[in-house]
Amino acid sequence: MIKRSFFGLVKPKLQYEIIDEAQAEPVSIQPEKQIRLYIDQSYENAGNSVFKTGDPVKSGQKITLSDDAADYLLSSKSGQISKISPFVGILGKKFTSVTIDVDDESSQSCDESFKSACQAPSLENARNFLAGLPGKPDFNVFFDSGKPVKAIVVLGADDDLLGITNQYFVKNNIIAIKTGIALLCKITGISNAILIVPQHLEQVAGSSGAIIKTVDSEYPSAHPELIMQHLLASEDGISREKSGIAFFSAEAVCAIGAAYTTGQFSLEKMVTFVSKDGNKRLVSVPIGTPLQDILNEFNETLNDGDRVVFGGPMKGSSVFSTDYPVFPDTDTIIIQDKHQITERSDIACSNCGECVRVCPANIQVNLLIRFLEAAQYEEAADQYDLFSCIECGFCSYVCESRIPVFQHIRLGKHTLESMKAAEESNA
Amino acid sequence: MHSTLKLTVSHAPFWHNGSSISTKSRNILLASLLAVVPGCYQYGMAAVGVVTLSIASAILWELLINFISRRPVSVGDGNAALIGMMFAMMLPATMPWWAVVTGTFFAVVIGKEIFGGIGANPFNPAVLAMTILMLSWADLFDFNAALLNYQFDFKAVYPLVLSKTFGASAVDPFALMDLLFGKQIGGIGSTFGIGLIAGGVYLILRGFVRWEISLSFLVGIFLSALFFYILNPDLYAGPGFHLLTGYTLIGAFFLATEDSSSPVNFIPMLIYGLLGGVLTVLIRNIGTHIDGVLYAILIINLVNPLLDKIRPKAIGKGV
């Protein structure tokens, strides 16, 4: 954990992880018995489930709850569904958990339905087949008729601290990124492709054929919202209201390129695993592999009170159990010892202003938090810029009173959004 | 699949820079010792008594309020002790015990707790208590009378009284160097200038107080005092004198910078400090009061919320 520097005159700085010149090859870990996929649909509304317990699935097969649903995941292994159950994630978000007992390595079989689709690459079949790829590419943005997409932005820099997934792909696989970008441009008809990389990878990225832009090494400069802000200011013809920008991670672009050229999915997710002693290791695991299998590989033991974080230290989420699987967008897994955890407190804001000085969105966090703590979310949104927050977590990181500011912000946004949704459904 | 492992689950971020209110209070208390220890050396055990009583009673008042209002005990954050220390630094060493205890009551209970505790006070609690006491028992704060029984090897007259009553020429015997090294009478912790500056610079470098406020406060005093001095050098003392006497230095580094009652944005901080400095000199030179720092700070505390309206636009707003 990076502590406050002794001299506190300047703003605190958090540096992004920089990939080593001699980065070790990722350790490949395979699931032992099961994989688990959390599908972004509620269990109750699943209706006529496409899958039932006992159904066989093939590697690369779409796992979804109803045929027309846009939310699906791709099974990274073939096997048999052993359990379908509800799961509740952060802020009450409902998932359906599908557990698959994995077949032996020798009897793995691949799903063939993409084979024919990949002959004629198009946005429709990309949305139909590829949204479950590592890096979680989102094609829905292209189907919003109100906001035509003006640029494709490929993130070759990692958004949160400690992660090096995207840098790894830029550094080692720029050819695949080039293929992926070319394919994306072809199927979308958009020629404006921008590759965002950290400064030290600018040279390497040059051969991708895309426009290269660099971000600096301080958190949160590689945050998509800030990149968007930067693009809005510098690119002609892009405006927040009228046009969309499609963001893809470098990992997703590689996977898309590979899928169309080979007709098969690579469903191995590149994850940085940070153990309790701070050791960082790059691992390559099939999506859906439970955390326990990764812990076993590294002989990492967990005790009561420890914390497991999926995602980076600033924006990730902590999990309840070691059954939690690797998601398509899990870039980092961090294990924290009980003693490394700083407890949050309920001391009131002392108005020191640290949060205001670090906020990349220029929000008056000291005033905002007073409204959020009193649950006056509407005032917070109207007068104190609640919805300008880009959710970088910096305010909570520096808070002297150790207020869970970020949590208050998320709760405020969530409450307002669900109120709005309820109003719309009643109208 | 019921695991017995109980993991800690909380919201992001999972890192914290380790700062806390108690660290900050501890550091400010430490820095203030640089001025308080020489003060105690100068005034003897009486001063030690006032300082310790002030800190202790401030903590007890807060504890009592915690108890009455059935809220978690908050004295651990060191803020009450800090208020007690700040209050004691401004007092003459001969302050009677009941006045000290009454003062910390005003500071902690009236100045802070009734507004909702830490971070909710509109005024600097110690300054508020001082002004209430000064208005109520003015004779206790007549430094010349209070310190009559002390023997000093320097001119034992409160410098600001001299300049106010007899004009600028009366303060000529005060060499700026002597003032800087505390060869003047005044509050226990507010006369040893070099200690206050060192403490202030330490706090600024550590980021516990904002340089914008301290610096602009001093600049405000310097510029306005210079203006008066140029206008009439016989009547008004020079800027150096104003910077080193009364509560100027403790005000600039310890009082005006109090978190809750000061702005957080860059330009507001500059205006806030500057305004404080200018008001101080105005009150000293053309007002009826001897020292203007405390009133100036109360006034800038009052305009603080208004000043903080000067802020940059949040992203995505008003583009």
Image (cartoon, grey):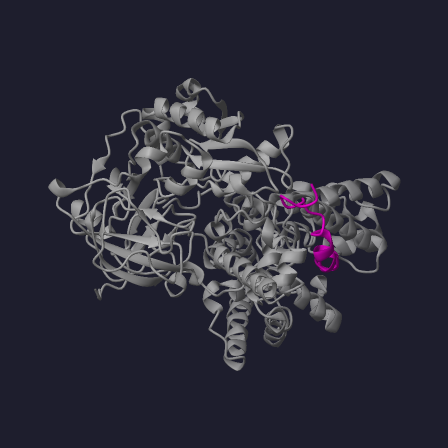
Point out residue A362 in the picture as x, y percentages from the top left corner: 61, 45
Q: Can residue B48 be spotted in the picture?
A: no
Image quadrant where residue A106 sits: top left
Pick whichever, A173 or B255, lies toward us.
A173
Q: Is residue B182 left or right of residue A175?
A: right
Point out residue B312 in the picture as x, y percentages from the top left corner: 67, 44
Pick whichever, B187 or A180, lies toward us.
A180
At horizontal 56% and vertical 43% (from top left) the residue drawn is A144
Pick whichever, A3 or B22, lies toward us.
A3
Q: Can residue A390 be spotted in the picture?
A: yes
Image quadrant where residue A41 sits: bottom left
Q: Which residues are magenta?
A: B294-319
Q: Quadrant of the N terminus of chain B?
A: bottom left
Q: Is residue A350 left or right of residue B270?
A: left
Point out residue B102 in the picture as x, y percentages from the top left corner: 62, 75
At horizontal 42% and vertical 57% (from top left) the residue drawn is B11
Indicate whether residue A276 is drawn in magenta: no
Indicate whether residue B305 is drawn in magenta: yes
Q: Quadrant of the C terminus of chain B?
A: top right
Considering only vertical position in the picture, is A137 above or below A317? above
Considering only vertical position in the picture, is B189 above or below B238? below
At horizontal 67% and vertical 63% (from top left) the residue drawn is B122
Point out residue A246 in the picture as x, y percentages from the top left corner: 51, 36
